[in-house]
Image: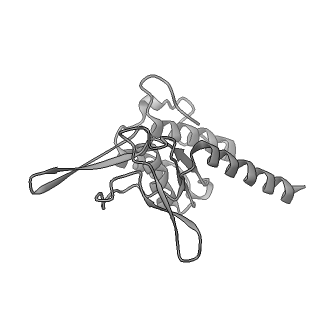
């Protein structure tokens, strides 16, 4: 789901969706039926705490977060480095990642390189091959000097939305073949 509402905070939307999902699974809204994203905390740790204090691990689903706006840059100021992290998808992907770690639910954080190298604030992803012959991201979308970035991407679609769409269609086809 993409939250494009004015002033919307995507990570609060995750919590609203989880609240409804839990109702479907359990018949109970962990945060109440009238919970609104406007009631959600704005801070990452407080959002994580809200979920861990109210949502039963038994029903936590696996969440796949997909984003195309994540960046980081390192700026030199004399003898010190300043790290700047941004992108409108960063915080909600980070929350999905941390929920997966906390609940051991197998969440996946995917990045789609939709810039094609054309946007100055997004570093294009460079792809290489590992020892087993698998494609791996060897650089991007963040600054390689940003070693402490808490957001770790699990899957990178360097080929943009076309590669992502092919992957989803192939997965759906395989699933349909298994269930028929």
Q: Is residue 31 visible?
A: no
Q: Nearer the viewer, residue 111 or 54?
A: 111
Q: Indicate the quadrant where residue 106 lies.
A: bottom right
Q: How many marks?
A: 0
Image: 176 above or below 92 = below
Most extreme residue toward the right is: 180
Q: Is residue 117 visible?
A: yes
Q: x, y percentage for residue 50? A: 43, 46
Most extreme residue toward the bottom is: 131
Image: 11 above or below 163 = above
- Judge left or right: residue 121 versus residue 125: left
Residue at x 57%, y 32% (from the top left corner)? 33
Quadrant the N terminus occupies: top right
Q: x, y percentage for residue 46? A: 36, 45
Most extreme residue toward the left is: 78
Q: x, y percentage for residue 102? A: 47, 60
Coloration mode? one colour
- Judge left or right: residue 17 versus residue 126: right
Residue at x 61%, y 38% (from the top left corner)? 20
Residue at x 84%, y 60% (from the top left corner)? 178
Q: Nearer the viewer, residue 18 or 153?
A: 153
Quadrant the C terminus occupies: bottom right
- Judge left or right: residue 167 versus residue 103: right
Image: 45 above or below 14 = below
Q: Nearer the viewer, residue 55 or 135?
A: 135
Q: x, y percentage for residue 134? A: 59, 69
Residue at x 17%, y 54% (from the top left corner)? 81
């Amino acid at each position: 789901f993409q939250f494009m509402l004015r002033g919307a905070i995507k990570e609060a939307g995750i919590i609203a969706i989880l609240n409804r999902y839990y109702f479907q699974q359990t018949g109970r809204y962990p945060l109440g039926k009238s919970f609104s994203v406007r009631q959600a905390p704005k801070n990452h740790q407080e959002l994580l705490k809200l979920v861990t204090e109210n949502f039963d691990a038994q029903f936590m689903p696996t969440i796949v977060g997909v984003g195309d706006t994540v960046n980081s840059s390192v700026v030199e100021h004399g003898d010190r480095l300043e790290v700047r992290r941004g992108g409108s998808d960063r915080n909600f992907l980070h929350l999905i990642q941390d929920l997966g770690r906390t609940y051991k639910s197998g969440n996946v954080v995917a990045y789609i390189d939709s810039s094609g190298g054309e946007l100055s604030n997004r570093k294009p992803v460079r792809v290489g091959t590992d020892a087993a012959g698998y494609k791996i991201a060897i650089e991007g979308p963040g600054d390689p000097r940003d070693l402490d970035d808490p957001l770790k991407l699990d899957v990178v679609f360097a080929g943009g939305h076309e590669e992502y769409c092919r992957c989803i269609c192939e997965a759906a086809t395989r699933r349909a073949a298994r269930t028929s």
